[in-house]
Amino acid sequence: MYVCFSRKILISIAIFIPHKSQSLLYHPDAGVEGKYCLHFHKAGECPECLFKNNAIENSQQRGIIVHDTHQTTVENNVLYNVRGANLYLEDGNEMWNTLAYNIAICPFPFRDNGYHGCTLPGTSNPTADTSDNQSGFFSRAGSNNFIGNRAANHFNGMFLQEGSIGRGEAYFKVCESAAKLGRMEGNTWHGNGRFGT
């Protein structure tokens, strides 16, 4: 079990070891790129990469990130009160990852004058985190599998941003609109302000 009570403590997890049944209470600094609760970072093809049965609460900048990594499994995780995109596929070149049976819950309504739902200004991707399109599940890459996931009370339950050419190191190397769509099955989006999918 990992527990973090201070924003000054960073939990760093090696990407090639399967992580099962961890509990995370984490408060990273908002707006600092790379400080996320769970993060597959530029691992390339990594079918052994696994985030499973984790609980993430009160994160100030996203929850689970897949960045330039392919064929991972993100399964049976619960995210509660995570500001910004809860589950985030970052640059648009992530392919054939499976996000299955995850739950993302925002406890604040979008029209709340204090918190504005789970939006978060000042991050590296305002489209994914602010009132533009804050989402329980956010992806720039359609070639991934989303199976049996749930999102409640976000601005968008899931937002698949298409029509661009990637971001970061993937910029101008991918055509998001031409990507083959992965498996989308059994997802449920409850009480979101705008889109389900």
Image (spheres, rainbow, N blue to C red):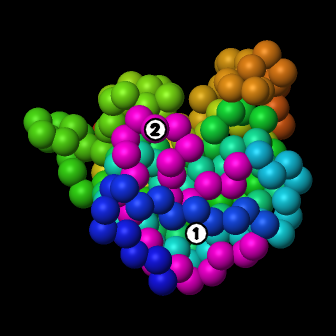
Q: Residue at x 40, y 52 (%)?
A: 28
C-alpha separation, residue under disc 2 versus residue under disc 1 = 28 Å
Observer-side mark, 2 or 1, equals 2
Say if 128 sits above or below 1 in the image. above
Looking at the rendering, which quadrant does residue 186 occupy?
A: bottom right
Disc marking residue 101? 1
Q: Main secondary structure of the magenta part?
A: loop
Is residue 132 visible from the viewing direction of this image? yes
Instruction: Please tell me which residue is depicted at 33% across the width and 36% down the height of the picture.
Output: 120
Residue plotted at (21% across, 51% down): 108
Residue 132 is left or right of residue 149, and the answer is left
Mark 2 or mark 1, earlier in chain: 2
Q: Which residues are magenta?
A: 17-41
In the foreground, 133 or 84: 84
User: Which corner quadrant of the image does residue 174 belong to?
Assistant: top right
* Residue furthest front in the image: 8
Q: Secondary structure at mark 1?
A: loop
Looking at the picture, how far across and down is residue 16, in whole percent?
Answer: 78, 66
Task: Name the amino acid type tagged 1.
Answer: Tyr
127 is higher (above) or lower (below) than 146: above
From the top left corner, tell me how far across and down residue 172 is, in percent. 79, 16
How many numbered circles does the render carry? 2
Q: Where does label 2 land, which residue?
A: 32
The answer to whether residue 40 is magenta is yes
Observer able to see residue 96: no
Magenta span has 84?
A: no
What's the residue type where badge 2 is placed? Answer: Val
Instruction: For mark 2, give the secondary structure.
Output: loop
